[in-house]
């Protein structure tokens, strides 16, 4: 059987220190992505909402129009900055996420754009599961006050390496999405995400390792660095997990970068040892991936 990851590849997750200044965030991201590419990383990831503060009141103000694609530079400076940067760095760039506004201006989304080293847009993912939680005395957040959800699973075929899946933050809590992507052949699940001090401590690492363990694939979570002067305090702790649920690298809360080589053949080795893939009982329960098309754009 063909290997899911066709050749070993270096993955870089950039835990960026993000500010309220969009153009500063874009130029800072450029510096860090170029730094990542110098390590030999070929897939580079930025955090959720890397160029705006994270908060419902900020989304309308920072949102950019992405459709029809490609947008003009005025409609989306971030689209063009990321496309140019992927080309300049010569990497597949998963551009974290940015607030997106529909052309009509009525709907807003939390959207991740992935560019090829040519600068071409490969895929966009609109966060499918909106972050609406209420833990009394700890954290209340309601993305659905201003955002609309996306409605597809995003799988991206990278010719040299294989398929990756991109989803955003709260999406990780819904294992179906990960399982469907893995059953469609993804070797890597990437989640730009910004957990907080409450749920980060509880579930960030557990979610990453659980998705890797359930699906026997690589998982990468990329957070903004923590800023205690901001209204929303991100957990940080960006991490790369292997298909045995082993933590290959985890940052602390400060700005930094995880760079890890994902090894061709390792997923198959793990699956040979614990052969879940041939042991599923679709005569007892349904295959969640049946009939679902994962698509890029
Ligand atoms: O799931 C969580 O605990 C945090 C989710 C989140 O911060 C987000 O979706 O942006």
Image: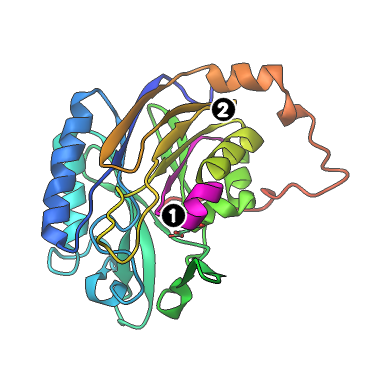
Q: Residues within 10 Å of mark 2 (few under 14, many from 20)?
A: many
Q: Which residues are magenta?
A: 184-203
Whichever of labels 2 and 1 marks the residue nearer the N terminus, that label is 1
x, y percentage for residue 85? 17, 43
Residue 168 visible in this rendered orientation of the protein: no
In the figure, 210 relative to 47: above or below? above
Q: Which residue is mark 1?
A: 197
Disc nearest the viewer among 2 and 1: 1
- Where, quadrant-wise, is the N terminus in this rendering? top right
Q: Which mark is residue 243?
A: 2
Q: What residue lies at 23% left-to-right and 58% top-to-bottom?
A: 51
Q: Quadrant of residue 43?
A: top left
Q: List the single residue furthest toward the right.
A: 284
**Is residue 77 part of the magenta span, yes or no?**
no
Label 2 secondary element: loop
x, y percentage for residue 224? 31, 50
x, y percentage for residue 166? 44, 47
């Amino acid at each position: 059987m063909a290997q899911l990851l066709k050749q070993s590849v270096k993955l870089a997750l950039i835990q960026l220190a993000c500010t309220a200044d969009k153009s500063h965030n874009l130029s800072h991201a450029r510096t860090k992505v170029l730094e990542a590419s110098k390590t030999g990383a070929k897939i580079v990831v930025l955090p959720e909402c890397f160029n705006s503060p994270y908060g419902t009141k900020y989304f309308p103000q920072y949102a950019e129009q992405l459709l029809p694609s490609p947008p003009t530079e005025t409609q989306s400076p971030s689209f063009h900055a990321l496309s140019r940067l992927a080309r300049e760095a010569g990497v597949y760039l998963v551009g974290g996420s940015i607030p997106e506004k529909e052309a009509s201006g009525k709907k807003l989304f939390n959207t991740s754009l992935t560019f090829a080293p040519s600068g071409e847009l490969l895929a966009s993912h609109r966060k499918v599961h909106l972050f609406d939680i209420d833990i009394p005395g700890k954290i209340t957040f309601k993305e659905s006050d201003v955002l609309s959800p996306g409605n597809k699973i995003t799988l991206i075929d990278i010719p040299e390496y294989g398929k990756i899946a991109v989803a955003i933050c709260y999406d990780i809590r819904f294992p179906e999405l990960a399982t469907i992507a893995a059953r469609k052949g993804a070797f890597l699940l990437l989640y730009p995400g910004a957990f907080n001090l409450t749920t980060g401590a509880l579930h960030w690492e557990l979610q990453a390792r659980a998705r890797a363990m359930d699906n026997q694939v690589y998982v990468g979570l990329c957070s903004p660095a923590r800023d205690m002067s901001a209204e929303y305090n991100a957990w940080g702790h960006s991490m790369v997990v292997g298909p045995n649920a082993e933590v290959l690298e985890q940052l602390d809360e400060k700005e930094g970068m995880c760079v890890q080589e994902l090894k061709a053949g390792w997923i198959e080795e793990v699956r040979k040892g614990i052969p879940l893939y041939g042991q599923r009982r679709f005569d007892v329960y349904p295959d969640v991936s049946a009939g679902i098309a994962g698509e890029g754009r």
